[in-house]
Amino acid sequence: MDAVVQRVRTSWTKKSRGGPEAARRNAAPTAFLLPPGLSSALHEVAVRESDSFEPRMQVRDLSAPGTILREVDGLLRVDPPEVSMFAMPRRHRRPPAVRLAPGQWLQWQINYRFVGSCGGAWSYQVETFNILYGSAAPDVFLGLPTRRVDERGALR
């Protein structure tokens, strides 16, 4: 399968819910340049409060992109991203799968709130999946996506 997935995971705690720290968090990009020559791979980017929202990147194989990708009738079918049963808000209704033609790309965003098991402190996360069907130029995800799905909900 000729597809490239860039998964950008931004995570924070109560410390970054307001004020200057929230401004730094909100300024974190949802798309990055890809490494040159990348094809059929997962480009993971972690943007964490604990790293002062500086991105940490790695390239992995496409075996576990966080969503199900399948080629069907010449199109790439992208099923909704996997969600944790421990995350809020609950998502009882999910959007349908998205189909991409060669050269098209999708941006799918989803957010979560988690309650810690020790002390009950909350943490937050937003995941952005940038998914291209075809070969990728390094700057492919810096433009406007062909399709966009926004599953972000109120996190309180």
Image (cartoon, rainbow, N blue to C red):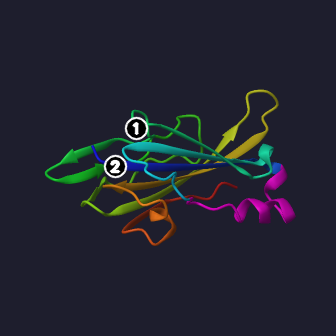
**Marks 2,1: beta carbons within 8 A:** yes
- What is the crowding at mark 2: few (fewer than 14 residues within 10 Å), some, or many (at least 20)? many
Residue 45 location in percent, x, y? 60, 47
Residue segment shown in magenta:
15-32
Give the quarter of the figure containing the N terminus.
top left
Residue at position x 70%, y 55% in the image: 156
Q: As shown in the figure, which amino acid type bears the numbered disc 2?
A: Ala
Which of the pair 16/86 is nearer the observer?
Answer: 16
Residue 109 location in percent, x, y? 51, 57
Q: Which residue appears farthest toward the top when viewing the image?
A: 118
The residue carrying mark 2 is: 3
Taking the magenta stretch, the answer to whether it contains residue 148 is no
Q: Could you tell me which secondary element the residue under label 2 belongs to?
A: strand
Q: Could you tell me which secondary element the residue under label 1 belongs to?
A: loop
Q: Is residue 90 above or below residue 64?
A: below
Residue at position x 82%, y 31% in the image: 119
Instruction: Identify the image quadrant of residue 63.
Output: top left
Residue 131 location in percent, x, y? 40, 54
Q: From the viewer's perspective, is 51 left or right of 128?
A: right
Residue at position x 49%, y 64% in the image: 139
Which of the pair 124/74 is nearer the observer?
Answer: 74
Sequence-wise, which precedes: disc 2 or disc 1?
2
Instruction: Identify the image quadrant of residue 16.
Output: bottom right
Q: Is residue 18 above or below residue 87?
A: below
